[in-house]
Amino acid sequence: MTTAQARYSSPVRVAVAGCGAVSRLYYAPALRRLEAAGRLHVEGVFDPDPKAAAIFAKNLSGPRTVSSYEDLLCKSTQLIILASPPKFHARQAIDALESGIAVHCEKPLATNVRDGERMVEAAAKCNRVLSVGLMRRQFAATRSIRELLNSKVLGDVTFIDVFEGGPFDWPVASADYFTRSQSGGGVLLDIGTHVLDLLRWWLGEPLSTVYEDDSMGGVEANCRIALRFRDFEADIRLSRDWARPNRYFVRATKGWLTWIANDARNFSFGLHGGNSAAEVLLHHPVNRGAEPTLGPVCPDFEFAFDSQLEATIAALTGHAEIVSGSDALTTLKLIEGCYARRAPMSAGWML
């Protein structure tokens, strides 16, 4: 048994900080499933709103609710899930890491690069896992698209067009979400964290960026990003007030593909000049006799939260494919660079 294996018991003892919408809607069901499977046990829960903490705890197998974040940093805790507002991520993560506790941090990693760097440095210094909740990498669809692009089945990418967003309807608990000093940014930091992470994961690092948004002192509701890669450009439009299909379109020399944002197990593709195209529903492969065949349909959106927590648990005792703090930091640097080079978006309706 290795030192790491001896350090982490099974089930892994977990604490949760932040019991807002993402915890209530997605982490709670994932934690219930993983508790039932014997992979973890939720021991402590904290939220500055005691009612929110009590509601969250009620949905699990009786974790204690505590009155301060520091109360979670006890010797028994092995992994903390940080689902608190982004402005708290750096302080809470560093406190946990320095207490010998691994951290799974909801996206974004932090509200600024310097805080993100401090988190990554603390994880390295303390030799503890720091994973980040960029859960779209867990989708069967995004993984298959990555394999398709890397295999060059569709040829070399020549252009990418992305639109994501829509009228804002997330159940926030306060106005902090709309205040730059509290949230760190608007639609770019919120949705753009996912979009830029996926494009980096699929295609590598862009060479340059051009950025514009509609901020007039507050957080931006709309933005446009032009990413220049070696042989092609990606045009990205993000919005918090424009209802349009949330679509990723990739054109390549031999064909094309389309993915609808957050569809975990479907995408479409075709070849140029072909008289047909395919809409793919992804299955797990199974071997029956000498030939592989289709097994169960791949999991839907919400099960990506299970997968990322499973990966983090596996990383506690060995190698696992997580989105590391240092990887998420690269995306945060790209976002901060966009804000630093911001140009005002054309607002013709104001003329």
Image (cartoon, rainbow, N blue to C red):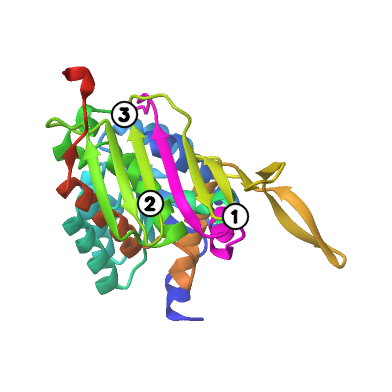
Residue 138 in view here: yes
Taking the spot 36% from the left edge, 50% from the top edge, the residue there is 196
Percent x, y of residue 75 = 32, 63
Question: If you read the primary sequence from the N terminus, does the residue marked by circle 2 or circle 3 appear first?
Answer: 3
> 322 or 251: nearer the eye?
251
In the image: residue 70, left or right of residue 5: left
User: Magenta stretch?
Assistant: 144-171
Figure check: 47 above or below 93? above
Q: Residue furthest front?
A: 273
- Looking at the rendering, in which quadrant would you find the C terminus? top left
Residue 21 falls inside the magenta stretch? no
> 184 or 68: nearer the eye?
184
Residue 163 falls inside the magenta stretch? yes
Q: Which amino acid, mark 3? A: Val
Percent x, y of residue 286 = 76, 59
Residue 15 in view here: no
Figure check: 307 above or below 204? above
In the image: residue 211, left or right of residue 170: left
Give the residue pinned by disc 2.
233
Taking the spot 21% from the left edge, 30% from the top edge, the residue there is 346
Badge count: 3
What kind of element bears circle 3? loop
Q: Which amino acid, mark 2? A: Glu
Give the residue pinned by disc 1.
254
Locate residue 83: give its quadrant: top left
Figure check: 125 above or below 263? below
In the image: residue 324, left or right of residue 27: left
Question: If you read the primary sequence from the N terminus, does the residue marked by circle 2 or circle 1 appear first?
Answer: 2
Give the residue pinned by disc 3.
172
Percent x, y of residue 250 = 50, 48
Q: Which amino acid, mark 1? A: Lys
